Image (cartoon, rainbow, N blue to C red):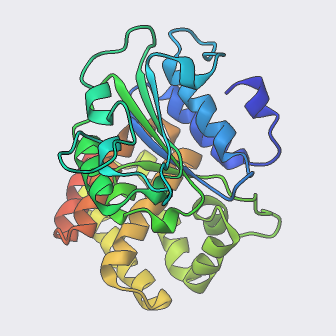
């Protein structure tokens, strides 16, 4: 991280996550930074873009809008939305709001930067056609491309998009004094910690399971998967939520665990995101967990 970002107040967890992503190489290609306006998510997201553009350890220090390998997208027009023509050319869409669609921008390799970076401001303002087109782009992202989403309303972003990116919360830091280990590892906001407290027994079991993974052998993967599935059912019962939502939540907890306790495995972030997509798509949770744990313990 640059010195300017390092000096930002708070955001300790978010800054640590961003740093580990940079250190992990090419394992993460799409990020979403979320948090209240002015919390520092803008600065952190821009710093990530500058590092991805740079061919050296020092981040690019010029204006992002002037870099040939950076495409900035933001809401436009009287309705202040991001339309389909931001993602791809569309016939009969009326007034053209964006000069270069994302798909056209990513057809070629970077000219001067290390990567090509697409930076989407207020991604929650995408209309349905634009959001669905972005899904396909995220699925077929070339190895030289990176996409950064920025929003203060993550709940307004399609769940299928959220499942295809690694999300970094930039909300106000919570006080860890007196907090339990599950709250510290899995809960980055006060609201999230309330959810964990409501199902503390299940989340404690989940953390205990995750802590056993770094010393577990691959032949135990199916047993660990079975335990994870059982705990997700306990979370569903204790929080009074649907089984599918609880299983997706368990995968989000696993992502947080890798960031905070097992960074050596952060390269598998995309596999976790893919498993999350399968769960949201009503795939067989047992098979999804089996495949993920087998990869994780390889």
Picture quadrant of residue 151: bottom right
Q: Is residue 238 left or right of residue 246?
A: right
- Where, quadrant-wise, is the C terminus in this rendering? top left
Which residue occupies the foreground of this view, 160 or 204? 160
Q: Residue at x 31, y 62 (%)?
A: 128
Depth check: 163 or 37 in front?
37
Q: Position of residue 171 (x, y in %)?
A: 69, 58
Q: Quadrant of the N terminus?
A: top right
Residue 84 visible from this viewpoint: yes
Q: Position of residue 138 (x, y in %)?
A: 29, 43
The residue positioned 34% from the left and 42% from the top of the image is 96
Q: Is residue 265 visible?
A: no
Q: Is residue 90 left or right of residue 187?
A: left
246 or 152: nearer the viewer = 152
Pick the front one: 71 or 271: 71
Residue 134 coordinates in the image, percent (x, y): 30, 48
Left or right of 169: which side holds 247? Answer: left
- Choose top left, top right, bottom left or bottom right for residue 158: bottom left
Residue found at the far front of this picture: 95
Give the residue displayed 63% in from the left and 13% down from the top. 58
Q: Seen in the image, is 176 located left or right of residue 43? A: right
**Vertical position of residue 246 compared to residue 189: above or below:** below
Q: Does residue 298 lie above or below 162 as drawn?
A: above
Name the spot of residue 97 as percent of width and height, x first.
39, 42
């Amino acid at each position: 991280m640059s010195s300017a970002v390092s000096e930002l107040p708070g955001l300790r967890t978010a800054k640590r996550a961003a740093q580990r992503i940079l250190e992990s190489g090419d394992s993460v290609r799409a990020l979403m930074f979320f948090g209240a306006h002015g919390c520092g998510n803008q600065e952190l997201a821009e710093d990530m873009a500058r590092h991805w553009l740079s061919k050296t350890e020092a981040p690019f220090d010029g204006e992002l809008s002037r870099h040939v390998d950076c495409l900035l997208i933001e809401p436009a027009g009287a309705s202040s939305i991001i339309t389909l023509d931001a993602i791809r050319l569309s016939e009969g869409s009326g007034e053209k709001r964006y000069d270069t669609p994302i798909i056209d921008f990513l057809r070629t390799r970077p000219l001067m930067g290390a990567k090509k970076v697409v930076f989407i401001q207020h991604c929650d303002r995408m209309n349905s056609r634009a959001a669905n087109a972005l899904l396909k782009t995220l699925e077929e992202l070339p190895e030289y491309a990176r996409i950064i989403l920025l929003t203060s309303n993550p709940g307004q972003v399609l769940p299928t998009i959220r499942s295809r990116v690694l999300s970094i919360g930039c909300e106000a830091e919570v006080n860890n004094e007196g907090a339990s280990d599950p709250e510290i590892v899995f809960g980055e906001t006060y609201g999230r910690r309330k959810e964990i407290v409501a199902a503390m027994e299940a989340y404690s079991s989940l953390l205990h399971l995750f802590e056993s993974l770094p010393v577990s052998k691959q032949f135990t993967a199916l047993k660990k998967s079975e335990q994870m599935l059982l705990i997700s059912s306990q979370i569903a019962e204790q929080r009074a939520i649907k089984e599918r939502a609880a299983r997706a939540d368990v995968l989000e907890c696993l992502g947080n665990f890798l960031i905070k306790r097992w960074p050596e495995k952060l390269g598998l972030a995309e596999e976790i995101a893919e498993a999350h997509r399968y769960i949201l798509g009503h795939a067989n949770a047992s098979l999804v967990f089996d495949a993920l744990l087998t990869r994780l313990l390889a």
